Amino acid sequence: MMIAAFVDKETTALPHVLWIGGPPDCGKTTVADLLGSTYQLQVYHFDRYEMDHIRRADPERHPALFALGTKLADLDEKAFLEWLWLSCTPAEMAASGKSVWLERLHMVIEDLHAMSADRPIIAEGPGFFPEALLPLLPDPQRAIWMVPSEPFKRASHHRRLKGQRRAEVLDDPELAQRNHIERDLLWAEQYRQSAKERGLPLIEVDGSKGPEEVAAEVEAYFKILLPPPNQQL
């Protein structure tokens, strides 16, 4: 993945962006929204740009993302969900999903450049792996990572009804559900290891603290980089 080709431009052009990375179900979206409201930040949610990024995918620059879009266009819903959740192991799912997310990081940079530079931006998403994001930062303190404990992940996954549509469509929704959770737990461990190896800040979310308390930890980490609360810029 040719992340390095983008480094010089992005490290000088995005000094107003703060980043929260981590796998699914660790509370990134909630924390970003809470800080965005308190500090009048623009909030960028990686997940909400998925379909836009698929439409923008180039087969040469984004082969994994383009292939995903092709499957989505060519298969009906049941066939697509079977391919996505039942055709390979959780480890294979984690590897292919990570490839898609790393390709989308280039598009994230483009999206952030297109946003106003008049107010700080907080960007959150599951595709911001430390080893990929770190080379793009002008200062490592501009990013923090979150990861769920296994019990918290499983509880959050079920609470958010992530397998509901699969239960309605697939012949083996239980296997699809297990694969989904195991894939996400593999990503969580990858985040832990990557952050630990690089000495980067990592918040373990285990449910012992509420969303506001976790947001306060992230706020304290970013404190010197944040504008005064509720300042209209």
Image (cartoon, rainbow, N blue to C red):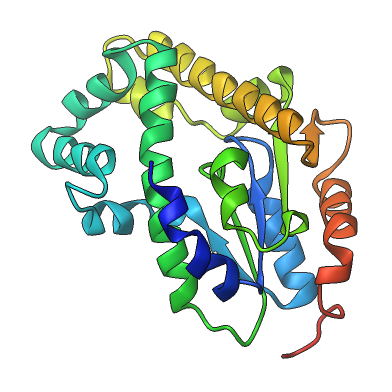
* Residue at 76% in and 64% down: 35
**Left or right of 174 in this view: 36:** right
Q: Quadrant of residue 189?
A: top right
- Number of marks in the rendered image: 0
Q: Which residue lies furthest to the bottom in this view?
A: 233
* Residue at 58% in and 39% down: 131
Nearer the observer, 27 or 89: 89
Quarter placement of the C terminus: bottom right
Query: Could you say where residue 185 lies in the image, as x and y percent from the top left?
Result: 59, 20
* Residue at 30% in and 14% down: 86
Nearer the observer, 5 or 32: 5
Vertical placement of 96 versus 143: above or below? above
Quarter placement of the N terminus: top left
Query: Could you say where residue 71 lies in the image, as x and y percent from the top left?
Result: 16, 35
Vertical placement of 154 versus 3: above or below? above
**Left or right of 125 in this view: 166:** left
**Left or right of 20 in this view: 217:** right
* Residue at 70% in and 27% down: 192
